[in-house]
């Protein structure tokens, strides 16, 4: 089974010059936590997440109406193609510690796949658990509750 069998199609995208508040409204409207960022010619240039909005925008005190998505997005984006095998996509998520991947063809976003999409496939329960374990690895060690003082 390949990514094209489970991906969200079409993906919701936003342009790099859109305001941060536009990204937040788009996420709320579609009940999603991340949006691929595209250039004027629809090539993928990054991804912006709800966490980016909080950490890279709000925590820095930036006005989300006057600052662009380009200022807070992640530029080095892990992607897969529609033909990528699902277990390979899970491995990319695990190794890059991400839960969502844009699906691209010729640098253009054609869909989106999330760890939750993979977990919905009964044949990939092990891969999902393994990916989640690797994504989350070390997180508990960073939490203050687990730090010895």
Image (cartoon, helix red, strand yellow):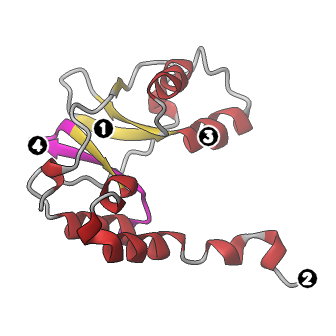
Report crowding for label 3: few under 14, some 14 to 19, many 20 or more residues within 10 A (C-alpha): some
Segment colored magenta: 95-110
Residue at image coords 55%, 39%:
50
Tags 1 and 2 touching, CB below 8 Å: no
Q: Would you say residue 117 is visible in this rendering?
A: yes
Residue at image coords 54%, 25%:
24
Distance CA(mark 1)–CA(mark 4): 13 Å
Quarter of the image that includes the C terminus: bottom right
Q: Position of residue 89 (x, y in %)?
A: 25, 63
Q: Which residue is mark 4?
A: 105
Q: Residue lying at the far bottom in this picture: please name it.
A: 148
- Counting residues from the start of the chain, the first of labels 3 and 1 encountered is 1
Numbered mark located on residue 45 in the image: 1
Distance CA(mark 1)–CA(mark 2): 42 Å
Report crowding for label 1: few under 14, some 14 to 19, many 20 or more residues within 10 A (C-alpha): many
Q: Secondary structure at mark 2?
A: loop
Q: Secondary structure at mark 4?
A: strand
Residue at image coords 44%, 30%:
70
State whether residue 7 is above or below residue 120: above
Numbered mark located on residue 149 in the image: 2
User: Is residue 22 shown in magenta?
Assistant: no
Q: Position of residue 126 (x, y in %)?
A: 34, 77
User: Is residue 108 shown in magenta?
Assistant: yes
Residue at image coords 73%, 39%:
59
């Amino acid at each position: 089974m390949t990514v094209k069998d489970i991906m969200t199609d079409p993906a919701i995208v936003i342009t790099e010059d859109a305001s941060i508040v536009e990204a937040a409204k788009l996420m709320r409207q579609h009940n999603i936590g991340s949006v691929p960022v595209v250039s004027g010619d629809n090539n993928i240039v990054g991804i912006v997440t709800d966490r980016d909005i909080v950490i890279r925008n709000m925590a820095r005190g930036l006005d989300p109406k006057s600052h662009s998505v380009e200022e807070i997005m992640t530029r080095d984006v892990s992607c897969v193609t529609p033909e990528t095998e699902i277990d390979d996509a899970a491995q990319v998520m695990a190794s890059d510690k991400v839960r969502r991947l844009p699906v691209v063809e010729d640098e253009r976003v054609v869909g989106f796949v999330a760890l939750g999409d993979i977990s919905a496939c009964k044949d990939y329960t092990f891969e999902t658990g393994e990916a989640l374990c690797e994504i989350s690895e070390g997180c508990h060690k960073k939490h203050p509750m687990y730090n010895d003082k």
